[in-house]
Image (cartoon, rainbow, N blue to C red):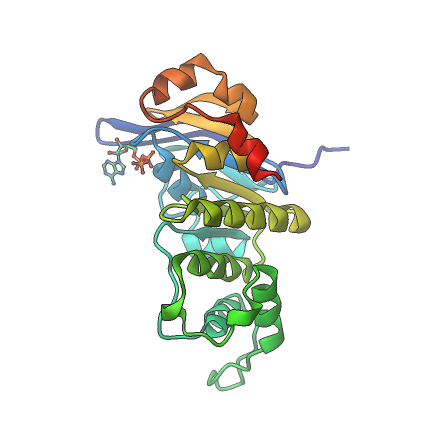
Amino acid sequence: MSAIPPLLAVEGLTKSYGGIHAVRGVSFSLRAGEILALIGPNGAGKSTCFDMLNGQNKPDSGHVRLLGEEITGRKPREVWRLGVGRTFQITATFATMTVRENVQVALVSHGKQLFNLFGSAPKFDRGEAGRLLELVGMGGYADRPCGELAYGDLKRLELAVALANQPKLLLMDEPTAGMAPRERVDLMRLTASIAREKSIGVLFTEHDMDVVFEHADRIIVLNRGTLIAEGSPAEVRGNPQVQAVYLGEGLVYDARHREGAST
Ligand SMILES: Nc1ncnc2c1ncn2[C@@H]1O[C@H](COP(=O)(O)OP(=O)(O)OP(=O)(O)O)[C@@H](O)[C@H]1O
């Protein structure tokens, strides 16, 4: 009997720009329901890696497999259809639409709502949009114009929009950038609980080490395009090579944050 493949398997991923080796032979895997952080100093290759996972950039060599299916080099839309969602540092929502309408648009894109025979106005299922908004704790905001939302609420809406595609894998590009500390904890806890409940694998990049050590199940570390460490938060925190790379970048982690945040 063959073993079940991991949700995401990355093997020997490589990309150069001229003489710059942005990503070199990177391999890792991710299980359903797991929260994996991808960290590294500026220019380490995190964005290049992300872009190759969702089809925005083609690798020079290497493989990306989703549940055993080769998705290397496929177009972003195709990869998205196969269940790879993504959130961005700069939120991508429609400011003049309401919160509910933003989710409905995402549901339409995924084909969860019905167009009539002539392709005119879609028949919205308010229920499904409402359920997604409840899931991210935004049920009470449904009729608010998006442009009026606080930044932390926008990020939760963006999560609901990403979930409309029923992703198997969610790529989150610095999900908590620009948020207040309390909002960071709330968003990451929410993401983790949804991911575990729905068996969604989450891969996120992050510069805030408190967020990483508190919320990641596992961490992979890139430096100059190469994967230099992989392990639990405790293992990565204690890795001398990682400490050397991050020296001066705040890898000094106060364990009290962890205790405080989990109460
Ligand atoms: N389109 C491009 N053309 C040329 N060089 C690029 C391009 N994109 C990235 N690079 C280079 O590849 C390397 C990796 O960049 P990348 O943006 O992937 O790093 P990163 O870890 O995401 O950095 P940051 O944390 O600053 O976002 C850098 O040296 C960068 O200058």
Q: Residue furthest top?
A: 240
Q: Across the whole image, how many numbered discs are drawn on residues?
A: 0
- Locate residue 98, reporting x and y percent: 44, 74
**Where the N terminus falls, by quadrant?**
top right
Judge by depth and name the residue closer to the eye, 231 or 118. Answer: 231
Judge by depth and name the residue closer to the eye, 2 or 5. Answer: 5
- Locate residue 221, reporting x and y percent: 44, 26
For image coordinates 65% across by 45% down, the residue present is 196
Q: Is 29 positioned to the left or the right of 151 in the image? A: right
**Rendering quarter of residue 7:** top right
Residue 262, relative to residue 245: is it above or below? Answer: below
Does any portion of residue 112 appear in the rendered image?
no
For image coordinates 57% across by 70% down, the residue present is 129
For image coordinates 37% across by 48% down, the residue present is 56
**Where the C terminus falls, by quadrant?**
top right
Residue 121, relative to residue 185: is it above or below? Answer: below
- Locate residue 217, reporting x and y percent: 58, 33
Judge by depth and name the residue closer to the eye, 33 or 8. Answer: 33
For image coordinates 62% across by 51% down, the residue present is 194
**Rendering quarter of residue 12:** top left
